[in-house]
Image (spheres, helix red, strand yellow):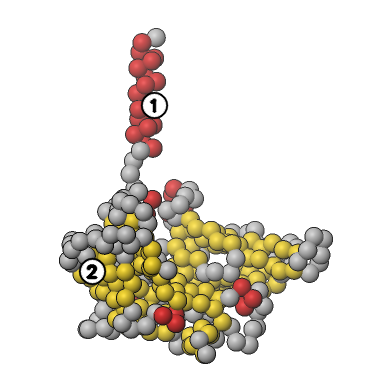
Amino acid sequence: MLTRSLLIVSLLTATAAAEATEDPPPIDAPAGCIDPVGADGLPTLLARGPKLIGTYKLIAGKPLDTPKLRLLATAHFMPERMGSTKGEWLPGFEVSLLPDVDRDGPNPRNSVDQHGYDALRIGTYRVRMRVVKPKPKGAVIEAVVEDLGCMEEYVHAPLAAGESKTFWVSTEGTRTYSFSTGHWYDQVARMYFLVSSGLAPDVQQTPGTKTPHGWISAQAWENQGGLPSWDDRYLDKLTVGSVLELPSHTFEVLKVVLGPSTSVVDGEVQTTGRDPVISTLVRVTRRAKPLEGLIRRP
């Protein structure tokens, strides 16, 4: 009986230890993703631009393996009112890294799912989908797979008091650059700067819109052991010389570059059909002494 009890305890201990195994530490960005070339030039991978991997026609509900990814598309109909035959087809999709998913099964490290029209990011890849032939069964969905060469987020070690760092973030590369000792879910002090963009809902729901429009924003955020604080800007205020302030950090916008398909007309962000594209060079400096009472700057 004692031997059996010891065996059970050993098994439980081993199981707990396996479950408690920590994830690998987050990785910092390669120079080609965030470091300026010269004083303020685009990083090499950002200057190169997305590399098209392929365009694939998917049948909703049937997975398709490509050389690098497993793609699974879905599509469901959202009636404009109960019982109506009019409404919108909303795509959904799941993307998994191969051979990771074959070896380990689907898990948060190798699989990402998305519902709606926004592009999906996994590893260094971006996947965009649209419904080509909507129908109740077997809807055809087109997937465009690109390799951006950079992951969506990287993590740098926290800055020392008075230390600065200059880096690029971009909707076409690394969108979020964090400063921390762990992952975002590790509940450790963290600071980040990000850029984001998207098409307006009416553009997404009406293919062929003559003047697609959307939004662009940037945000600085930190949690240094207290309440979260943030400062954000939409495009009209995201200009060279803009300063975003947090209790422990300050950000200066050094350069703003819009993509060739993105323009601003009478204050409205317009594109030629895809999400608006923006790249921003910023310099972050950690304050020698945190500001008191600065919780959020709207």
Report the residue marked by disc 2: 285
Q: Identify which amino acid the numbered label 2 is placed on.
A: Thr
The disc labelled 1 sits on which kind of residue? Leu
Q: Is residue 230 above or below residue 39?
A: above
SS at mark 1 in the image: helix
Q: Name the residue under label 1.
A: 12
Residue at the extreme bottom of the image, as rendered: 265
Percent across and percent down for residue 75 are 66, 63
- Residue beneath the point at 29% across and 76% down: 252
**Quarter of the figure with residue 124:** bottom left
- Quarter of the picture containing the N terminus is top left
Mark 2 lies on a secondary structure that is: strand
Q: Distance between the residues labelled 2 and 1?
A: 47 Å
Q: Is residue 194 left or right of residue 116?
A: left
Query: Percent x, y for residue 105?
Result: 48, 48
Point out the residue furthest to the top here. Answer: 1
Q: Can residue 119 be seen in this view?
A: yes
Return the residue nearer the eye: 151 or 200: 200
Q: In this view, does 102 lie above or below 121?
A: above
Question: Where residue 113 sits in the image (x, y, percent)?
Answer: 53, 58
Q: How far from the left and from the top, in percent, is residue 90?
A: 66, 66
The residue drawn where x is 42% and y is 84% is 258
Q: Which residue lies furthest to the front in this view?
A: 293
